[in-house]
Structures are given as C-alpha cells and as structure tokens.
Amino acid sequence: MPRIGGCIFAEAAATPCADARIFWRADWDPSVVLVEARPVLSGDAEAFDLRRFAAWATVLRLADGREFLLLSDGVRHLQLELVDDTLLAGPVRLHYALSGITQIDVKTLTLRRLVVLCRRGRFPLGLFPPEPRARRWVLALQAYDGLTAGASHREIAMALFGETTVREDWNGRSQYLRLRVRRLIQVATALVQGGYRDLLG
C-alpha cells in the first residue's frame, strides 16, 4: 500500500472507465464503510455471500491480509473496507463501524445502497443521482490533457467545441470561448493538484 495517497492502486490509463476498478481507503473517501466479517452458515437470514454478487464484485487483498470490496456495475459503485476476517471463505455477517457526525450521512448512504442491492439484486438508481458537475470535470481534464500534450488554447477549443465554433467565435467580439478554455484549465489544474479529494464521497 502506498505511504502517500488514498488510492490503493490505479488502473492502466488505457482501461475503459466502465472497466476500471479503483479502490480508496476509508480514511480518504468518506463513502467507504469499515466492516467486520464474521462467518455464518449459508442459511442465516443475515448472511452476505460474495458469490451472489460475483457479477459486480472485485476483492483486493493486500499483503498484510486486509481486504477491500468494490461492488460496481461500471457506472455505480460502493466500497467496503474490511478490518477483520475475510469475505472469501464463505457467507459472513457484516458488522459496520460507524461513529461521529460529520461523515455519517455519506456512510449511511453507502449502506442504504448496499441494502437495496442485497434485497433487490440491482443497484438502486434513485440512490445514485447524476452528478451535475461531471460534464465540466470531463471537459476540464480533456483540456488539461491537451495542454500537457503541447496544444494551444485554440487547439484545445477546437477539440472540445468543434472547428466551426472556434472559426466563428474565437476572434469575435466576445472572449467567452477563450475564457471558457482558461477556466477549464484552471479547474483541471486544481483537481490534479489535490482537489480531486474534494470529489470523494
């Protein structure tokens, strides 16, 4: 596990985002819930059996024995960090470690999502509302990629908004397009320099 940073490992850059499996530590991402897993018989009404969730489950086991469970359909996800025992040896009963006030809402949201997934066998769409800022973040990171590749602001604008828009508006009376590219680069720079942590949870 890295000494610095909250991401335990990163996927290869070429991996499609729907296939990427990124794990975060609970002390970095408040939506990650700490759990203990205690063995039970498969007939136990409270049993959590990993095999039932094989289509969505990825388990990361570190050298020190700690486990992380990511349940994801490629768009929606939830994550648990085990502090005791294992999910890999059969059905378990999950015991959740919750405390404090400031992060309780986001942690209980993770548990509500888990409960619906367990009961209905699907991710609850209503508990995963669209992020209204996501489109801007995508544009910002694309602009940043262009900048680091040596593209000019005009070239970035062409890639993001099309040649016709740039041809008509880049040298027009309004500077909106130039300003938009600058703002996107500023947003991306802030994200890359650590602001991404504010998006967690």
Image (tube, rainbow, N blue to C red):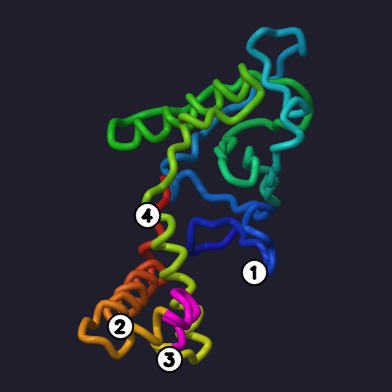
Q: Amino acid at mark 1?
A: Ala
Which residue is under mark 1? 13
Disc 3 secondary structure class: loop
Which residue is under mark 3? 152
Vertical order, 182 against 89 (above or below): below
**Toward the viewer: 72 or 67?**
72
Kindly identify the residue that appears in the image at 61 percent across and 17 percent down: 119
Kindly identify the residue that appears in the image at 36 percent across and 77 percent down: 185
Vertical order, 158 against 33 (above or below): below
First in sequence: mark 1 vs mark 3: 1
Closer to the eye: label 2 or 4: 2
Closer to the eye: label 1 or 3: 3
Q: How many marks?
A: 4
**Position of residue 159 in the picture relative to residue 57 (left or right):** left
Closer to the eye: label 1 or 2: 2
Q: Which residues are magenta?
A: 155-164
> Residue 178, which numbered label?
2
Disc 1 secondary structure class: loop
Q: Amino acid at mark 4?
A: Arg
Which residue is under mark 4? 133
Cα–Cα gap, marks 1 and 3: 23 Å
Cα–Cα gap, marks 2 and 3: 11 Å
